[in-house]
Image: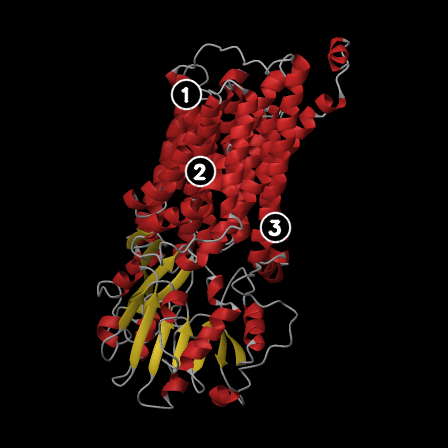
Amino acid sequence: MSQTSVTDGVEPLGVRLTPLIFGLAIFTSAMLVFSVQPMITKLVLPVLGGSPSVWNTAMVFFQTGLLAGYAYAHLLQKVASLRLQVGIHLVLLLIAAIFLPLRVNGLLGDPDPSAPIGWLLATLAISVGLPFAILSATAPLLQAWYARVRVGHADGQNPYVLYAASNLGSFLALLAYPVLIEPLSSLSGQRWGWSVGYGVFVLMIVALGLTVWRARALTRSDPPRLARTTPIDWRERGIWVLLAAAPSSLMLGVTAHLTTDVASAPFLWVLPLALYLLTFVIAFQSRPWIPLPITLIVQSALLAVTVSMVAFRSSSWMLILVVHLTTFFFTALLCHQLLAGRRPPPDRLTEFYLLLSVGGMLGGVFNALIAPVIFNMVWEYPLVLVAVGLARPRGGPFTLRHGYFLLGAAFLSVMPHVVMEVIARTPSLWPYVQDLTTLKLASIILGGAAICAFLVRDKALVFTGVLLMIALSAQHVARGYDWSLTERSFFGVMRVAEIEDSGMGGPVHVLMHGTTLHGAQARHPDHACNPTMYYAYSTPIGLAALEVQSRSPEVRMGVVGLGAGAMAAYKRPGDTLTFFEIDPMVDRMARDPRWFTYISDCAAGPVQTVLGDARLTLAQQPDAAFDLLVIDAFSSDVVPTHLLTVEALADYLRLVGPNGMVVLHVSNRNLDITLPTVAAARQLGAAERHRIFFERPDQPDMAEASTEVLIMAPTEEGLADFVDDPTWRVIADTEVRPWTDDYVNLWGALVRANF
């Protein structure tokens, strides 16, 4: 009967539903693959201090897992029987299920802060490696099956359309994670929910197996293997790899650029990755929403503007977010549209995806593993932005008009150097033109060069050359006038800037991470041992330290977060002081007298540094080990969230004993982290007071910094000296949910602070 219906041109219902079943299975697997990435990274993030590099390194693992999955899908095509392929895949899915529910495997112990990358990659491999790789194989594998099952049908000739369904599922999963999944469920709930989704997907593969069986029953044979076309030459394969590597590298580059100045959080991880996947959806549509000619025009304008401004700081994080993400989106879209235009026939499909995954992995390896070793700052992001210009059309012959624009761009690229040198060598100009104004002037001049770049956009080599001139000029100007030292580690790029502050006797060294200041010290001997900025005697942190010291001539102090070491200026001969710092590079810089002397010259006696994540190292300290414990660790512009949970605060209270005090530095430009911290303190029954201090206009620029602090003690007696001070207040009752090791809602913190 079935054979007759096929002959008559009427397909059975099951056959007609085949495209839907395949599309739904690919969509589901993609949602599982891309929801697990922020989830498992969030699980491991606390162990490495909340560093933005954790996500970039994890992305290398995920891209490697994707490559392993695509390689497996490609090799499986050597098995002639489609039914046997389905059986093998189903067995491997069941074997991978032994890792459920997902968790961070503790087999390797705690990471070494001086070499955390190997630990992170190995831990992810033994925690989620097998299920991730097997699920990653789904998109190319099911497209290859679809091409065979639907041979002879029009849709079987273009299985690449299913790739759009795959990336749509990935895109929706990434958007849902920070907005819905993270705020509404705990990590343990996410792990179990993902496990249920994995089980549902296995049932879908069973349904696909029945579909393949039905196809064989109708034709009385296995679906035929596709006819082999001409092999792809190595030049074309190389182009595929490069076009795939560039967006992957830029995705990690723009993520590092954004998270350094805002926060290392899932909502900032997933935005670039979601846009990256959306470009795949658009590029592989049969009729793209954004045609390639439009992409070429918009991308050239955005690229020129972004390259001219990437080296300069901005106080508007929303402007930074919009400009860089829009540029990344159109640049990734350009590369993926060029890839879509070069896609091979269906019989070469798995090879195509395998090489795309090779490119994706190489882009990630370059950013996360190679660049931190060979560059002392985030050079990889602007360099790859420039290099993508070579992917654009080369256009016709070079004309005189192109030459005029090239000369104009060269002139405008050099002008910022000249302007800055003239101002720097003419002291009489400084009262009229301040440093910030000159940097704005430099960026405006470079904006003219960016216009010249846009006007030669149809000449790839000339366009790229202009972009390179702009990038080098911008980086040189920003470096020459912003900082004296740059060092880079897994935990970020730290800079020491030297600025003039006449109120503090002249030069002041400032420690910076992105646009966030982590301490400052005057170099003049009369001011060098005065703690500055957040740690000045007049700030809440300084007042709390002086109050505790007034109780006894011998105080035990612990400080989480070293920075420039300003808290060492408070150490008296009878005091003990221990810093808890995750980054060995920061400890080395703070102890180097060329840059800061708080520890070497100002502290009365030795100062100890304990390296490692504070939660892990503090857990090893005895009860009541400190009279004063200052929590002042910042990653980007925010305290790592695992240092503000109920469990973390409970440990701090244990460490200070009944009469000690905990000082939590909660200053932040972009997130409300105060209310969940207050809620956590109240859940523990701790006494707490809150204060916001505003720097005084009559003080030198670097003497003080506006500071928000929450002080906490196990009992009211521990805060007795602050109860009658009206500047320290109790925050009104809040309905904000306290953060725990199992629940953090950074999206809510962003919304409360900005909307």
* Disc 1: CA contacts within 10 A as few (<14), some (14-19) or many (>=20): some
Q: Would residue 542 be visible to someone looking at this image?
A: no
Counting residues from the N terminus, which is met first, the one under dot 2 or under dot 3? Answer: 2
Image check: 707 left or right of 171?
Answer: left
Circle 1 residue = 237
Q: Nearer the viewer, residue 697 or 562?
A: 562
Residue 235 shows in the view? yes
The answer to whether 167 is drawn above or below residue 7 in the figure is: below
First along the sequence among labels 1 and 3: 3
Query: In terms of secondary structure, where does tag 2 sit?
Result: helix
Q: Amino acid at mark 1?
A: Arg
Mark 2, Cα crowd under 10 Å, few <14 / some 14-19 / many 20+, is many
Circle nearer the N terminus (1, 2): 2
* Numbered badge on residue 65: 2
> Which dot marks residue 193?
3
Seen from the viewer's position, the closer of residues 601 and 368 is 368
Tag 2: amino acid = Gly
Instruction: Tell me the residue at 55%/21% (across/down).
Output: 82
Is residue 518 placed above or below 682 in the rendered structure? above
> Residue 121 in the image: x percent, y percent?
38, 46
Q: Quadrant of the C terminus?
A: bottom right
Residue in the picture at 63% in, 34% down: 204
Frontmost of labels 1 and 3 is 3
Q: Position of residue 477 (x, y in %)?
A: 34, 46
Q: Secondary structure at mark 3?
A: helix
**With 421 as the anchor, is 345 left or right in this view?**
right
Residues at marks 1 and 2, CA–CA distance in whole angstroms: 21 Å
Q: Nearer the viewer, mark 2 or mark 3?
A: 3
Q: How is the image coloured?
A: secondary structure
1 vs 2, front mark: 2
- Check disc 3 and give the amino acid type: Gly
* Image quarter in which the N terminus is found: top right
